[in-house]
Amino acid sequence: MKVSWDIFCSVVDNYGDAGVTWRLARQLVAEQGLHVRLWIDDLSAFVRLCPDADLKAQQQWQEGVRVCQWPAEWVNSDIPDVVIEAFACRLPTPYTESMLQRSPRPLWLNLEYLSAEDWVSGCHGLPSPQLNGLKKFFFFPGFSDATGGLLRERNLIEQRQRFQQDKAARQGFLQGLGVEPLPDARLISVFAYENPGLGSWLDALASDSRPNHLLVPEGRILADLRRWLGVDDELHAGFMQVRGGLTVQVLPFIRQERYDQLLWSCDFNVVRGEDSFVRAQWAGRPMLWHIYQQEDDAHLPKLDAFLALYLACLAPEAAHAVNQFWQNWNIGSDLDESWLALTEHWAEIEKHAGHWCLQQAARTDLATALVQFYGNSL
């Protein structure tokens, strides 16, 4: 009999939380042979990730996963072997009461947000006794063997490498999106939050001696992009304009597998949140992470912690250039000078991105680590 898992997701950051849990659910089904229900409170976000989904269905099967609308008023359901509370979303009280009655009681995991901070490894796997008698365990994704690792499907790196080595496959994918860059153009994808410093970067790209082609999936950065372009109407998929040496092209929001291929196709990727942040690392290409902003700048130490790890093996000059561009982007400062400094070390930064990817891919992936944790709990 298959082991049963429930994953609960409350959508906070548009698509990031839903994206992580949807990838995890599919991988647990496809690679671990588990029965997985994904409870999600915002099906509109899920439909963007899975266009085949039915927005109005209370329950539906998608890619082997039983996707359920998380109702405002909970209706009793059977309790599985493992319960994942993603990103500290609060489980329904009737559900936890049913967990108490189940024998044996399910393994309850709080899947935390990804962080490179030092304290994470010390908290990973720790129990948290609850007042009702249940026990919840903290499960932290991360970048060391003392954490739960990163979401990575089996053979993902090999698939990516084959794609990047196949010029016809890359060209065919881009043409399918209506993208036809100049032969020597630097291809850049941008999936980011609002940024007041964006215009200074676009100015630098437009005045560059090398052509730059910006691919922008529909999202929150479009308003800043529109202001720089001086366009009155809202930008939508299909929009394209050339300004100096810069081509700006707006893409539709695409499903996760195609977004992976977009990252693989580009020379530089700007990503946001958590899901696209991890996928950009698997692309093995230079990148920038627009971290989710928190009150009192609580996000900046998290950014610093990752950069300390990510840049550790780079030469000081290149590391400084990457750090400066990332920091400026995340505080909304001007970006022209720091971008030019970064491009001076392009070859080294490009090589480093590939090495970092392989270093992280050598660790146990998150889905496998979760299953191992369950096995050890029996």
Image (tube, rainbow, N blue to C red):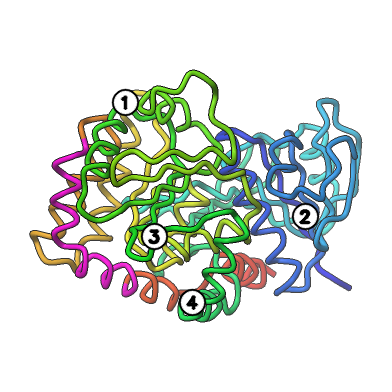
Q: Please indicate whether residue 19 sits to the left or right of residue 79 in the image.
A: left
The magenta span reads 335-355
Provide residue 299's location: percent of width, then percent of height: 35, 36
Q: Amino acid at mark 4?
A: Lys
Which part of the image, by quadrant, shows the N terminus?
bottom right
Q: Main secondary structure of the magenta part?
A: helix
Mark 3 nearby-residue class (10 Å; few <14, some 14–19, many ≥20): few
Residue nearest the viewer, comparing 94 with 353: 353
Residue 198 is drawn in which quadrant?
top left
Mark 4 nearby-residue class (10 Å; few <14, some 14–19, many ≥20): few
Q: CA distance from mark 2 to mark 1?
A: 50 Å
The local secondary structure at tag 4 comes to helix
Q: CA distance from mark 3 to mark 4?
A: 14 Å
Provide residue 281's location: percent of width, then percent of height: 41, 62
Q: Residue at x 63, y 50 (%)?
A: 254
Q: Is residue 361 above or below residue 204?
A: below
In the picture as drawn, the residue positioned furthest to the top comes out as 232
Q: Earlier in the sequence, mark 4 or mark 1?
A: 4
Q: CA distance from mark 4 to mark 1?
A: 36 Å
Please give the label number shown on residue 196.
Answer: 1
Q: Which residue is mark 4?
A: 167
The local secondary structure at tag 1 comes to loop
Q: Amino acid at mark 3?
A: Leu
